[in-house]
Image: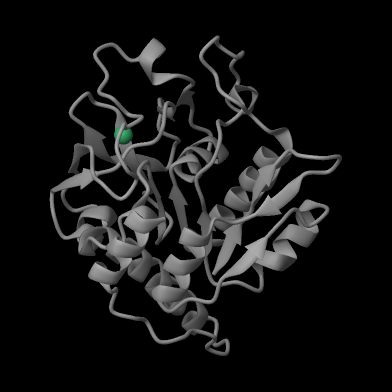
Amino acid sequence: MGIACAHEASGSTGRWHVDGAYIRAVTGAGGVPVLIPPAGDSKRLEAVLDRVDGLLLPGGIDVDPYLYGEEPLPGLGKVDPEWDALDVAAARAALARGLPVLGICRGAQVLNVAAGGTLYQDIPAQVPHALQHWQNRPGWAASHSVSVVPDSLLAGIAGRRRLRVNSFHHQAVKDVAAGFRAVAHGADGVVEAIESLVHPYALGVQWHPERMAHEPHHWRLFLSLIEAARAWRAARGGREIFGEERVFDAEFSLRDIKEN
Ligand code: MN
């Protein structure tokens, strides 16, 4: 399972890294994490993606509005052209080849922009009567509800029409990209998940399931991603490089999260 790296612009060249929660979610679900930094050019990035069975696009900072044809508004947060370049190229390559891809928070926004959609640069300034989408409580705790569109990939995975989710975003999907549809909304109408209409597994969720893995309907997102990756590998007759999936130890995990 490829995981696109985050970029921290420190020092002269910065640091490329992945938050441990994503690695833990992938390994716990039976996957083998492969960290993906920039490869030098798109050909080499595609060669890297040839060697993984899925792609996880993690959370992070804002996406540059230039990528969807807008000028920056005052409420736009920090953006990073190098990080955007990696994420958008990886997302486009995954979508083009049908590689299973799960976008989380920024990753969901990246999927939408990579496929031609747009974003709200700043929810409080642009969405009237919006809920609080940057919660004042721990990340493992849900803060608002979302309604899930029936008969969607997400509804099948989560196994319910209503979910309680955490929320750490001030950007959100505005115009859903062609070939995608919105499959979850907050009570304020903000898009909380998108999925492809044509690709077998291209899903983006606006919340952070890796921080709520103690809840089965969030944990199942990772199990489903690894399952899609296994199917992708099997369809190509490749060698299995998956591990045993663990039953997620909710009590241990929650205690662990609370103590950290
Ligand atoms: Mn939210």
Q: Does 167 sit left or right of 76 as displayed? A: left
Task: Using the image, determine if residue 256 lies above or below residue 149.
Answer: below
Query: Is 63 or 165 nearer to us in this picture?
Result: 165
- Most distant residue in the front direction: 259
Q: Quadrant of residue 170?
A: top left
- Most distant residue in the left direction: 161
Q: Quadrant of the N terminus?
A: bottom right
Residue 33: give x, y in percent of width and height. Answer: 56, 71
Camera sees residue 87: yes
Residue 234: give x, y in percent of width and height. Answer: 48, 84
Q: Quadrant of residue 185?
A: top left
Q: Quadrant of residue 157?
A: bottom left
Camera sees residue 99: no
Q: Quadrant of the C terminus?
A: bottom left
Residue 55: give x, y in percent of width and height. Answer: 54, 61
Task: Using the image, determine if residue 188 lies above or below residue 49.
Answer: above
Residue plotted at (23% across, 44% down): 142
